[in-house]
Image (cartoon, rainbow, N blue to C red):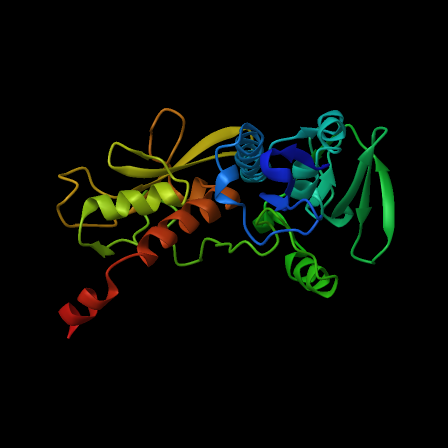
């Protein structure tokens, strides 16, 4: 972006998510002069900065939703958004796979996304080769579904890959053999005490989990069906003490599912939510009570 003239002989521009100013001699200033703070050009640049920040966040949020919900993504859509720097940053180096006409993908044919265009995607595979594949639709696999996850993590670390969306190094959970498949409640992360309910609901909201009916909620679309993970947080006075409750999974009608019927993505994301809420508990008070 070029420089714009403003009063006082100054010039301003947008750079690195900030408004930068220089004086009449062309020397860049460490901070914006107070006299320019309400200048229409500066106000416009600040509004642009705020919009770009929201746009970048929304791009990452949308891509993460594609991953968590295993949504097929048309390559035509990726081609349209690829020139946008915010979209390109969110998509570059994500592990993707080409979907066939039946909606399946080959676990051995995944790679790091580097290029999109002309009905093709450019990938770096585990051999370190750059390959191009014709594709109509792709998927951004959830890490729990990647058979070569450890190899991919090591490969990405060797290449010093930094993903904008938490995929490869996202913490995952796998249902243990000790979990009763017929049970409908999982209590490993229940009992986390909070001084006030509002603290727990605020944590849930900050982590991106809406609270409805006393539950923090994470919705996952997997294998053609919607599953909702629900972690009880409480529904009393927001200033009352509370504690995290059991994790349950329901279908789209709200009926609790047997834990053995919960898919790997839903299990991982639901447990991730429950663990994150439990991690914010008042540990010191709990330790005193246990003495």
The residue depicted at 72 percent of the width and 31 percent of the height is 78
Query: In the figure, residue 24 lies in which quadrant?
Result: top right
Residue 76 against residue 256 in the figure, above or below: above
Question: Residue 227, percent across and down?
Answer: 44, 33
Q: Is residue 131 visible to the viewer in this orientation of the structure?
A: yes
Which of 269/50 is in front? Answer: 50
Residue that lies at the very extreme toward the bottom in this rendered image: 291
Query: In the figure, residue 133 lies in which quadrant?
Result: top right
Which of 208/234 is in front? Answer: 208
Which of 177/272 is in front? Answer: 272
Left or right of 93, for residue 230: left
Question: Residue 128, percent across and down?
Answer: 83, 58
Question: Residue 54, percent across and down?
Answer: 53, 35
The residue depicted at 36 percent of the width and 49 percent of the height is 274
Question: Residue 268, percent across and down?
Answer: 47, 48
The residue depicted at 12 percent of the width and 46 percent of the height is 240
Quadrant where the N terminus sits is top right
Q: How many marks?
A: 0
Quadrant where the C terminus sits is bottom left
Left or right of 28, for residue 35: left
């Amino acid at each position: 972006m070029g420089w714009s003239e403003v009063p006082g002989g100054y010039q301003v521009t947008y750079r690195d998510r900030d408004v930068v100013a220089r004086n009449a001699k062309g020397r860049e200033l460490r901070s914006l002069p107070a006299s320019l703070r309400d200048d229409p050009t500066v106000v416009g640049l600040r509004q642009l900065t705020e919009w770009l920040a929201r746009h970048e966040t929304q791009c990452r949020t949308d891509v993460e939703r594609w991953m968590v919900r295993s949504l097929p993504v048309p390559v035509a859509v990726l081609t349209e958004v690829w020139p946008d720097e915010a979209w390109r940053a969110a998509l570059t180096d994500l592990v993707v796979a080409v979907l066939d006409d039946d909606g399946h993908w080959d676990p051995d044919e995944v790679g790091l996304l580097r290029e999109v265009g002309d009905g093709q995607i450019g990938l770096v595979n585990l051999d370190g080769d750059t390959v191009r594949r014709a594709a109509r639709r792709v998927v951004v696999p959830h890490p729990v579904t990647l058979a070569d996850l450890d190899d991919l993590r090591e490969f990405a670390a060797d290449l010093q890959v930094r993903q904008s969306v938490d995929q490869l190094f996202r913490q995952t959970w796998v249902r243990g053999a000790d979990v009763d498949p017929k049970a409908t409640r999982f209590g490993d992360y229940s009992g986390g005490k909070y001084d006030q309910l509002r603290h727990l609901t605020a944590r849930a909201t900050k982590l991106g989990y809406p609270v409805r009916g006393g539950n923090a909620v994470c919705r996952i679309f997997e294998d053609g069906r919607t599953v909702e993970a629900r972690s009880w947080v409480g529904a009393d006075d927001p200033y009352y003490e509370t504690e995290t409750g059991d994790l349950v999974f329901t279908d789209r009608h709200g009926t609790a599912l047997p834990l053995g019927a919960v898919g790997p993505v839903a299990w991982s994301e639901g447990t991730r939510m429950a663990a994150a809420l439990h991690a914010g508990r008042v540990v010191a008070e709990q330790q005193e009570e246990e003495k």
